Each structure stands twice: as structure tokens, then as C-alpha cells.
Image (cartoon, helix red, strand yellow):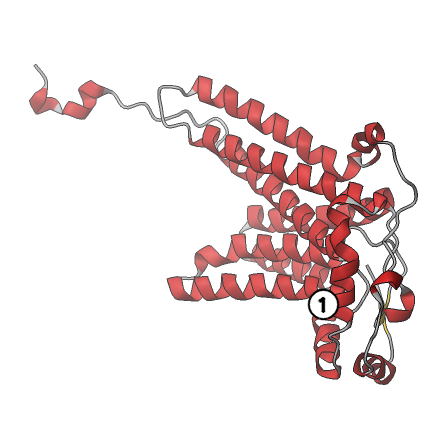
Amino acid sequence: MTFVVTGMISGLQLAAAPVDVPEASVPMPQGPLLLADEDVLFEYGYVWLPYAMAAILLLGLGAVAAIRWRHGAPRTAELLFTSGGLLAVLAAIVLGLADGATESNGLASIDPPVWQWVIERRSPALTEAAIVVTNVGSTVAMSIIAVAAAGYLWWRGRRSDAALVAVVAAGAGVLVRFGKATVGRDRPPVDLRLVAEGNESFPSGHALASGAIIGVLLVVFVPSIGRPWVRAAVIGAACLFVLAIGLSRLYLGVHWATDVIGGWVTGLAWLLLCLTVRQVWRHRGRPARIVDPAAAEGPANRS
């Protein structure tokens, strides 16, 4: 999602001026049309149905794995059940967010008051910081970071990690493009935006891409960090960075709150699905370890 930053001087002047938006004048975010309840499940199928189907598939595979390895430690079955359950929950959240985004109700009812609260607290210093954060966290910047990380991992001989980063990044880009087209939500009023954006609002591409790509980078790089406190610091800094990117989109007036939440949830769901598939692929064909009681006793204890 490419955007053009407005002039710094005019942006700072707009931020410095007190913003008084009466509650009655705060517009409700709108989508392309209002849908009957029975049409919701199908209208937003692209943004939630893949995760619901993946959840059903993973739960089914988990049941098969549990039956197949019922005499051993079903690590794969536990992974499938856990991931399937989490994906089902995330799919339901995405559906609720997408429905509310178009109908301007439900979860999206928080958007006007949150939007007004944020724009009333702008300042020149915060505006400058938000513009820097939103530029660093853009989809273009995240793509460059992902390509550089994948190239480095490939060069180091970590081919599977490089492929994982590439798949997560490419999938995030596809989800942003088609998710916006599917929901078709309008952005907040243009006269109070501090940067220019021309495409649809839901989900936030910045939130989705940063959540998925920063998440996968943590997965592939953090285990190689030796000291636990350094690992914890890196994870904490990465989480704060993703949070700051999403909040910068709210502050700059180009997204509603549920756009950002939808981006984070969708990015997390996609990352979880990719990690689960990779883990199951690594364990493919590995039978559960079944301990022979006679062998466990040892030669000296056998009668």
C-alpha cells in the first residue's frame, strides 16, 4: 500500500491546531452496501472462510493423528488441535470485524469515539513521530525487510526458513489486496487525514503486513539468540513496534480502529497457519515413539 506523505509544514500546522469534532458530526464508517444477515457469511468469505476451512482441516487431521498414535505421545495431534482451535477463533473475529466494518455496527461501533479521541490529542511532535513510524512500517518497507531476510537466510543455507519468510510475506500482500477489495470500506474523512491514501480501509495493510512479517522474523531469528534476557528484549521491542505501527495509522487519521485490529488478527491467523503447516511437514512420516516395557527394564531385570 503506497502512500504519499503530505507536506511536513502543513501536516504540523494541522496537528498543532486544536481539533474540535462534535460527537454528532463524527461520521459512521461505511462500506459499499448493507447486507442481510444470511448473506454475511458468503459476502465476506474471502477474509474469514480460508481460516475457518483451515481450522476444520487441522482439527480433522488432529483427530486422525490422535487415533494413529494413540499408544505414543501425540505431539502432532496436539499441535493440530491447538492451531485448529485458535484459527477457528480468529476466523470468527475476522468475520465479526468485516461485518461490522461494512454495516457500521457491532464491533465497528467503537470506531467513531476512538477516532475522535485520537485526533483531539494530536501534537506536532507526535505527528512527526507517527509519520516516521508509519513510513518504516509500510507494506513496501516490510516487503523490503522480508526480501532481505529471506536472502540472508538462503545465503546462510537456511533454505526452509527463507522459504517460510517468503511465503508469509507474499501471502500477506495478497491478503491485503483482496481483503480491501472484498470489504470495500471507506476511510475516515479526508480533511482530517495527515497523510494521503487512496485505497480501501479494511483491513489495515500496515498492521497486517507488520504483524505477519515481524512475527515470522521473530520465529526464525530469535532462537539463535543465546541470552534469555536478550531474546525477551527483542520480542518485547518487536511487539511494541507492531503496536506503534497500528496506532500511527489511527493517529494519522487514515484508518478506523477496527481496520487496525482486523489487520493484526488477519496477519496473526496467516502466520499461525504457515507455522502449523511447516511444523506438520517437518513431522510428516515420523511415527510416535512407543516404548517397549521389556526393553526399558534392561537385560539385568529380565527374567
Instruction: Identify which residue is drawn at 51% across, 63% down.
Output: 236
Instruction: Identify which residue is drawn at 84% across, 84% down.
Output: 13
Position of the N terminus, as image quadrant, is bottom right
Disc 1 secondary structure class: helix
In the image, 152 versus 188, the foreground residue is 188
Q: Dividing the picture into quarters, in which one does residue 73 lie?
A: top left
Position of the C terminus, as image quadrant, is top left
Q: How many marks?
A: 1
Reply above or below: 1 against 66: below
Q: Position of residue 7 (x, y in %)?
A: 87, 80
In the image, 280 versus 43, the foreground residue is 43
Instruction: Identify which residue is drawn at 32% across, 23% down.
Output: 290
Q: Which residue is mark 1?
A: 248
Instruction: Identify which residue is drawn at 40% across, 65% down.
Output: 229
Reply above or below: 192 against 128: above
Give the left or right position of residue 266, taking residue 77 as reference.
right
Reply above or below: 170 against 74: below
In the image, 179 versus 161, the foreground residue is 179
Q: Dividing the picture into quarters, in which one does residue 278 lie?
A: top right
Give the left or right position of residue 107, taking residue 239 as reference.
right
Q: Dividing the picture into quarters, in which one does residue 289 lie?
A: top left
Q: Position of residue 145 (x, y in %)?
A: 66, 62
Q: Position of residue 109 (x, y in %)?
A: 77, 50
Q: Position of residue 286 (x, y in %)?
A: 44, 28
